[in-house]
């Protein structure tokens, strides 16, 4: 019985350490990608009337170009702006190919 308890304890500690190590994914590539997206969306060609948060859904193709799947907003001007600024644009640090990303962005009043 003691061996079984010891075995379960070792198994539990092993699982916790494995789980904890998977949570610590490198955040630097995500931050760099986010910075590039913000840079491309920096100056909209229309006035933003109220602070708006959108969640952009996108992926990358084999050439490292972003493919915007869903701009994440209802405003037609903003959808068109996001698609024009990001869709089929090359990025220095693209993410994984064919992986779907969700990134929340906040547009502030200009």
Image (tube, rainbow, N blue to C red):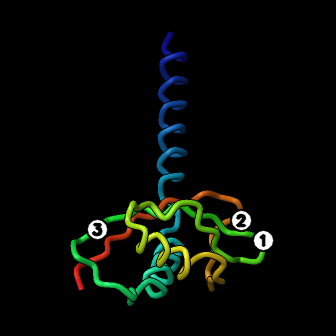
The structure residue drawn at horizontal position 54% and vertical position 38%, both measured from the top left corner, is 14
Any mark on residue 52, and which?
3
Report, in whole angstroms, how far the alpha carbon at label 1 lies from the one at label 2: 6 Å
- Under circle 1, the secondary element is loop
Q: Residue furthest front?
A: 76
- Classify residue 2 as left or right of residue 99: left
- Under circle 3, the secondary element is strand
Any mark on residue 97, and which?
2
Q: Residue furthest top?
A: 1
Are the two marked residues, 1 and 2, in contact with CB atoms closer than 8 angstroms? yes
- Under circle 2, the secondary element is loop
Any mark on residue 62, and which?
1
Where's the C terminus, which quadrant?
bottom left
Q: Where is residue 77, by image quadrant?
A: bottom left
Q: Where is residue 52, by image quadrant?
A: bottom left
Q: Earlier in the sequence, mark 1 or mark 2?
A: 1
Mark 1 residue crowding within 10 angstroms, few (<14) / some (14–19) / many (20+): few
The structure residue drawn at horizontal position 29% and vertical position 84%, both measured from the top left corner, is 47
The structure residue drawn at horizontal position 55% and vertical position 80%, both measured from the top left corner, is 84
Q: Earlier in the sequence, mark 3 or mark 2?
A: 3
Horizontal and vertical percent position of residue 101: 55, 60
Q: Can you say whether 21 is above or below 58 in the image?
A: above
Q: Earlier in the sequence, mark 3 or mark 1?
A: 3
Q: Can you say whether 103 is above or below 50 in the image?
A: above
**Total labels drawn:** 3
The structure residue drawn at horizontal position 48% and vertical position 37%, both measured from the top left corner, is 13
């Amino acid at each position: 019985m003691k061996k079984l308890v010891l075995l379960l304890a070792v198994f539990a500690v092993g699982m916790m350490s494995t789980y904890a190590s998977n949570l610590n994914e490198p955040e630097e590539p995500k931050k760099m990608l986010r910075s590039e997206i913000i840079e491309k969306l920096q100056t909209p060609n229309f006035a933003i009337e109220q602070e708006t948060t959108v969640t952009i859904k996108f992926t990358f193709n084999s050439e490292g170009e972003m493919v915007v799947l869903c701009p994440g907003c209802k405003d037609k001007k903003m959808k068109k702006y996001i698609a024009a600024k990001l869709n089929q644009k090359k990025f220095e640090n693209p993410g994984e190919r064919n992986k779907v990303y969700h990134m929340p962005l906040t547009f502030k009043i200009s």
